[in-house]
Amino acid sequence: MKVKLIITIGLALALIAMISIAFAEGENAVSGIEGDYILVSQDLPDGTTRVPPLVGGMFNITSKYWNLNVWWTDSAGKVFSVSEISKYSMTDSTYTETRTYTATNAGASGGPVKYDFEQKTKTVPVNREGCQISFQMPFDTVVVVFDGNKLTVSREGEFVDHWEKVD
C-alpha cells in the first residue's frame, strides 16, 4: 500500500513539474514575429523615400536569437551600416534582450568600424493591440511594430523603415 502511495505521489509531482515547464515555455513563446524580414523602403522626414540599393537590410529572428544587417546611403553617397546579434525572450508583457555583438560603420565620420562585444541585458515593456506587437528596442530609441508579415522600425524625426517578411 505504501509503495502504491509513493508511486502515485511521484507521478502527481512529475505531472505538476511537466505542466509547470510547459507553462513556463509558453510564457516565453514569441508567437508570430519569428522569420526573415527584408528592408523594402525607408521614409525620411523631408518626404523622401529611399529604396534599394540606397538602403537595404535583412533581419533574421528565431525563437531565441536575432541577427540584423542594415545599410543606408546618405545624400552625399556615404554608406553607413550596422550589424547586430542578440539573444532575446519575450512574454505577453516584456521583451528582454542580451546584446552580444554590434559592428557600426559610420562612413561619413571617416572613422574605423566600431565593434562592441560587451554583453548587456535590458528588459522593456511590450504593447499588444490586436495582431500588432510593439516595443522600443532596449539599447536604442528605435521603436519596432510587428503587424502580421510587416515590420515597421522608426526613430522619431529621423526615419521610418518598412520591412516585409520573406518566405
Image: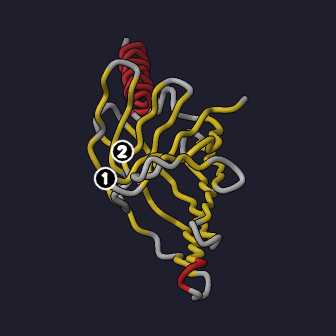
**Observer-nearest of 44 and 131:** 44
- Identify the mark at residue 95; answer none if there is no mark: 2
Q: Amino acid at mark 1?
A: Thr
Q: Amino acid at mark 2?
A: Tyr
- Identify the mark at residue 13; answer none if there is no mark: none
**Observer-nearest of 122 and 26:** 122
Q: Quadrant of residue 21?
A: top left
> Who's the residue at 58% across and 43% down the image?
41
Q: Quadrant of the C terminus?
A: top right
Residue 64: % across, % down: 54, 45
Does 53 sit left or right of 64 as displayed? right
Residue that label 1 marks: 123
Q: Specify which label sits upstream in the sequence, 1 or 2.
A: 2
> Who's the residue at 53% across and 30% down the image?
150
Q: State the separation of the CA atoms marked 1 and 2.
A: 6 Å
Q: Is residue 6 visible?
A: no
Q: Are marks 1 and 2 in contact (CB under 8 Å)?
A: yes
> Who's the residue at 57% across and 62% down the image?
84
